[in-house]
Amino acid sequence: MSSTPSKHFMKQSSKLLLEDLRKEREELEDLGELDITTILGSDFDDDSISAADQELIKEALIKGYDLRQYSKDVENNLNQMDKMTINDYFQERDNFLTLYTQIQVVDGVLETLETMLNNYYNDLKSIGSEMNSLQERSMSMNHKLNNRKLFDEKLSKFLDAVIIDPEFYSDLTNSKNGIDDYYISNLTKLDTKITLFDDYKKISPTICAMNEPQLSKLTVASIQKIQKYLATTLNSNFKKLAEKKQKQKQLANMGYLFQFLFKYSQYIASEVILSYVENNEKYFTSFYKAYVSALLKLLEDGAPGKNDFINIGTGKIKSLFNSTPSKNSNNNNNGQQQQQQQQQQLHTTFSMGNRCELLVKEVLELPPIEPPQSSSSIPFLEAALEFIPIVNTNNNNSNSNSNNNSKESGKELPSVKYSFDQLFRSMIYFLMDILGSETLFVKDFFLGGEDIILSIFTRSINHLVEVTENYLANSYDVVGLVLMISMLYRYRSMMNERGVNALDKPFDRLIAMISNRFVKLFSLYLDHIKNTSIKDLKAGISCNSPHYVIRKYADFITTIQAVSANIPTQCECQNILCKAVAELKDSCNGLINRLVQEIESKDDQIIFLANNYAIVVQSIQEYVVSSNGTGGTATNGDIIPPDQDITIKPFYKSFQSVAKKYVDTQIANLKYLSHFISFSWEWGPLVESNVKIDLKENPSFNTSNVTKILHAFEQNWRSAIAAIRNNSINHFSQCQYAQTQIFNLVITEIYTCYRMLAIIIDKYFDSLKSDPNFKSDKIIDEMKEMNPSLNLKYIYQE
């Protein structure tokens, strides 16, 4: 603890302070004469003196103060201040002493606090060391625990793998125990034991050697039991396909049986596969052959034959598009009524009908045709394969209802007959059904591929090819062939979408066979068209209706176009069809030109050509509309105009040219409009081209003549259109398309001439605008009401 400072110390400090003041004063006396430079320094910058100080100095100099006296006064003031300061210090000495004492006390407290903190810090260091030690011990104990757990786990695995529990052995070998999920679970454990056993031989060869014989016996016993079970289950011959599919679904969930067998005895696994392939190949072959044989009994009689072409002299004309023979013979060519009946029947017979419905998705996915029970020794499948959706239609329901009614009444109704393309669809679909089902099972159970499937179905596929080949040898149904090709492409696409590719090569083989037959038959048909005698066709010529041959081939072109829309564009078959359509169009054009030469009247020739060209355009357009613009004739659902459709375009252009001639002829026959038409076309283009017309040099170009023309037009133009329309109805009674187009052309022609006449009046005969017969755009409105679809602009519309 420090002592209080003595009075001697205080006096000594005051004495030192006075000495310092004295020294400063002596230094000031040594300065001598004082001026502003001496006081502030010679090198002092005047700019650094504040403005207030400068004013004081300036005032002192003006008043003439003595700076030395002023300095002494300042010194006396400072001495006085020093004395007063020292006096103040002496008066506060007690406070200073108290402050010093307090500082000493605080210093002692801080020293004590420092000691405490140092001790606390040392304690913390000791605690941290202990925590590190505890952490190291904990990690060591955790590591030992993990090692013991790992050891316990490995030991448990080792014991499970090496030791065979008697109960476990009994569960796997007891013949009374069937194969179920519990058995498969034990089989999985056995697989694990076998897998780990070889590794554990290195660790404990003695223990493993003791248990190895028992494990081997258990493995052999399991293999034998699985082999026996699969041989019995997989090779069962079910009477119904539905039962076989149901059993396969159950086996698919037990695929581990074959995996175990393949893992530990590939030889026996191969035997199981070979046995399965052999038995199922026999089963499906006999099943499929029986089904195809039953279907062929439903094939309709009277299919198109070699002589069933366009020849009308044989009396045996049949359809290329269905197998219904024409009931109308033409042995007697006399009588206009008999000819019309024959032409009407031929048109119906040669039309496409509903055969294109075979390519509709819902129809393609219908269940196969079910033969009558009496025609087949096998029960028909009860349900189609699940991966191909089944869509029931009214026709199918009606058939099923009729079958049910027949069963209920105990009477068997006559079986329905089908064309070969319909039977072919069922043959293909039935094969897809059973093959697709087997493919799914083989992938799930055997982990196999197409080699197993092809081995099972090779004979069935060959039988289908053989039946198709026999049919093609005597088939003359060109449309049926194209339908079959299109069906094959559609079905192959469906199978590929579901991951089944086993039928790709067989389908390609069938497509090639059918395409070759199509090319051969089509060439034969074209040659027949070219070589057909006009004498044989002359009886069917009537200028007021399309020739029945042209009707047939118009439908034929439409059919080819409709069916080819379902065939991929980048394939040889599509090129064959495109070439066939092009050749058919050329042959059809050639035949029309040959037939028209048999008509003497030029007017009748025009009507005949218009009828025949229009029927081709109409047939194709009817297909486009009915199919909602599909089949390559539309883009984004919008129907392509006939002048842009490459299929219709040649016939459309020919029809437009002939129709224009027909309209011109009809208008020329109307004497009260002939002057109006000729005048408008003579002067209208010149006036519209702003060619100046001299009225003096053209006496017919006068107000009187135009007034007569305007009056005749106003009185007769409506009746003229009605007369031409009535004539077109008579001349094109069997072709609505021709009637519509002719009517549109008549209105357009009269509108064009009237518009030119109105322009002539506007530029040269302004006075006629007030004529009551000049109604300007009101007539255009009447024409628009006759056909709103025509784009008729008003006379003064820009």
Image (tube, helix red, strand yellow):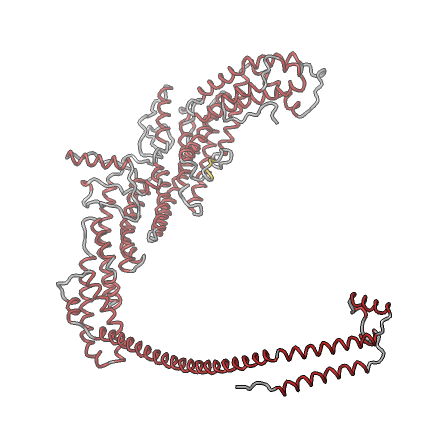
Query: Which of the 4 image quarters holds residue 626?
Result: top left
In depth, the one of 235 and 86 nearer the eye is 86
Note whether 70 is above or below 675 in the view shown. Answer: below
In depth, the one of 221 and 325 nearer the eye is 221
Note whether 23 is above or below 711 in the view shown. Answer: below
Q: Is residue 169 left or right of residue 662?
A: left
- At 16% from the left edge and 66% from the top edge, which residue is drawn? 171
Q: Residue furthest left?
A: 176
Residue 53's spot in the image, x, y percent? 79, 68
Quadrant location, the C terminus: top right
Res. 102 visible in picture: yes
In depth, the one of 277 and 407 nearer the eye is 407
Residue 489's spot in the image, x, y percent? 37, 46
In depth, the one of 537 and 589 nearer the eye is 589
Q: Is residue 638 left or right of residue 347?
A: right
Res. 277 visible in picture: no
Note whether 689 is above or below 700 in the view shown. Answer: below
Residue 796's spot in the image, x, y percent? 61, 23
Note whether 145 is above or below 551 in the view shown. Answer: below
- At 59% from the left edge and 85% from the top edge, which residue is drawn? 5
Query: Which of the 4 image quarters holds residue 760?
Result: top right
Q: Is residue 253 left or right of residue 543?
A: left
* Label total for image: 0
- At 51% from the left edge and 28% from the top edge, which residue is drawn? 656
Residue 496's spot in the image, x, y percent? 36, 51
